[in-house]
Every structure is written in structure tokens, then in C-alpha cells.
């Protein structure tokens, strides 16, 4: 089974701090994704990466950056945390798309981040 | 841009009843559709991925149908149990199939 591990289940940080959220997958997947999930808004894609050192902006990249130095690890960085970044953050991974389209995404358990 | 809608947003059913969850999407040029389950405070668990060439996909008590031309998918859960209480999300690819567009989910409560 695919295992996607997020480093923290709960995290509390202060406004202005630089925050790192880590995600590791053990299935050699090329694609990795960071989402945030908010009540009434659903899941929104922040960034994704389709290879080491490659990244693409999702729907809401402002205030975030990412790092993918190794295939198995994808980090989300909040450059200067603000209260509106309080949310549930979800990481996912998948194989690259084939002739049959995209492959199933597998999710971690999420990080509940609170910015005070 | 792909828009995904799930109806109803929330429902409660007595144990033993069959559940019918609906998902509709605006762009029918998709390769597949994925159904997920999410328990409170947890991540998403993949339930079924149904290819556009299939009309149905089954896993145990779960059955997903896909009608690409009308932009609809239905998830059936037979003989519901309290352990089926969760939020169910559907997702379809967009932007050249690199990304998924998600619905906001069907929140299900099965009453013992």
C-alpha cells in the first residue's frame, strides 16, 4: 500500500513565522501535491510537483512556496504565516499520467495548522 | 474550468438503507473519475477510480457508475452501516489531466 506521511498532525505557529510542512511518500511516485481544505470551500490545490526540482502553481499559491529536492519528499513553506492560512493541509502523491489519463492520488492524514 | 457539484451536501439514513450519492461535472472530456472517503479530521482515502471506458466499478458494497456524456457519476453504498458515516468526495481531472477538481462532498450519517 502507498504510504504518504505528513510530519505533524497538529501545528500551532505565530503570525510572521516561517513554517515548514513536510510530506514523504514511499512508492516512488513522480507527482506530489499540496492542498488546503477549508469548510465551505473544499479542497484547493496550492502547488504540485511532477519531478524533482520541478513545480507548478495551483489555484492558490500566494503566500506559499515549495521545495522538492528528493523524489520522496515535498515540502510546503509558508514564508510569513498569517491568520488566514489557518487550515487543514493535505499532501498527496501519484504516478504520472498515462494514455488512460491521470493515476489515482493517495493522501496523507493531513496537518491541522493554526496561526495565532 | 472544470466545476464539480455533489448533491446532497448532507444526508442521514437509518442503518440498512442503501445510499445514493451524486456527482456532476461540467467538462465531459475526462479520462476517469475518482471517489474518496474522508473521516473527520483525517485525510482522503481512495475508494474507486472509474475509467471513462467503464460504466461501472464495484468494490464490496460500493458501486460507482459513470455517464460521461451527461457529466454524472453516482456512488451506491448497499446496506449502509454506522461505519459508513463519513464525507464522500468525487474528483475529476482537469488542466490536461495533471490536476484534479474536487466536489465539496456528501456528508453522510448512518443512524444505528
Image (cartoon, helix red, strand yellow):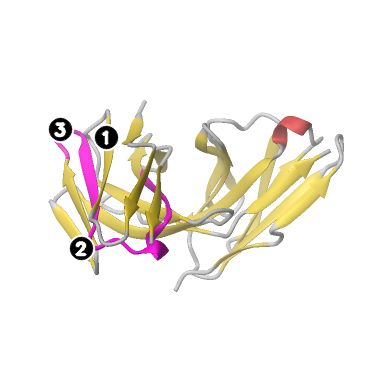
Calculate the distance from the C-alpha at mark 1 to the C-alpha at mark 2.
19 Å
- Residue at 24%, 69% (x, y): give it: B60
Q: Within the image, what quadrant is residue B7 found in?
A: top left
Q: Earlier in the sequence, mark 2 or mark 3?
A: 2
Which residue carries the number 3 mark? B70
| In the displayed structure image, the side of residue B70 where residue A6 appears, left or right | right
- Quadrant position of the N terminus of chain B in the picture: top left
Q: Nearer the viewer, residue B24 or A107?
A: B24
Residue A110 in the image, given as x and y percentages of width and height: 61, 55
- Residue at 31%, 60% (x, y): give it: B15
Report whether mark 1 lies on the same chain as mark 2.
yes
User: For residue B24, which numbered disc appears in the image?
Assistant: 1
**To which chain does the residue with label 3 belong?**
B
- Residue at 21%, 52% (x, y): give it: B51
Which residue carries the number 2 mark? B58
Which residues lie in the magenta part?
B68-90
Instruction: Please tell me whether residue A25 is drawn above or below residue A67 in the rendered image.
Output: below
Q: Nearer the viewer, residue A106 or A98?
A: A106
Q: Nearer the viewer, residue B104 or B28?
A: B104
Q: Earlier in the sequence, mark 3 or mark 1?
A: 1
Q: Is residue B19 magenta?
A: no
Amino acid at each position: 500500500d502507498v504510504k504518504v506521511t505528513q510530519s505533524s498532525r497538529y501545528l500551532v505557529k505565530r503570525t510572521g513565522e516561517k513554517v515548514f510542512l513536510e510530506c514523504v511518500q514511499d512508492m516512488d511516485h513522480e507527482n506530489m501535491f499540496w492542498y488546503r481544505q477549508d469548510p465551505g470551500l473544499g479542497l484547493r490545490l496550492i502547488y504540485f510537483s511532477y519531478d524533482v526540482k520541478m513545480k507548478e502553481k495551483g489555484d492558490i499559491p500566494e503566500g506559499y512556496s515549495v521545495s522538492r529536492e528528493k523524489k520522496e519528499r515535498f515540502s510546503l513553506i509558508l514564508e510569513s504565516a498569517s491568520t488566514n492560512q489557518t487550515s487543514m493541509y493535505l499532501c498527496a502523491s501519484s504516478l504520472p499520467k498515462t494514455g488512460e489519463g491521470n493515476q489515482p492520488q493517495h493522501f496523507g492524514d493531513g496537518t491541522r495548522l493554526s496561526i495565532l | 474550468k472544470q466545476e464539480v457539484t455533489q448533491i446532497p451536501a448532507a444526508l442521514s439514513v437509518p442503518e440498512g438503507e442503501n445510499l445514493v450519492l451524486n456527482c456532476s461535472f461540467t467538462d465531459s472530456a475526462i479520462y476517469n473519475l475518482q471517489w474518496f472517503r474522508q473521516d473527520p479530521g483525517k485525510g482522503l482515502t481512495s475508494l474507486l477510480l472509474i475509467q471513462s471506458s467503464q460504466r461501472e466499478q464495484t468494490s464490496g458494497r460500493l458501486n460507482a457508475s459513470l455517464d460521461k456524456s451527461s457529466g454524472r457519476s453516482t456512488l451506491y453504498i448497499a446496506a449502509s452501516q454506522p461505519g459508513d458515516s463519513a464525507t464522500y468526495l468525487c474528483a475529476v481531472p482537469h488542466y490536461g489531466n495533471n490536476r484534479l477538481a474536487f466536489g465539496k462532498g456528501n456528508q453522510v450519517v448512518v443512524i444505528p
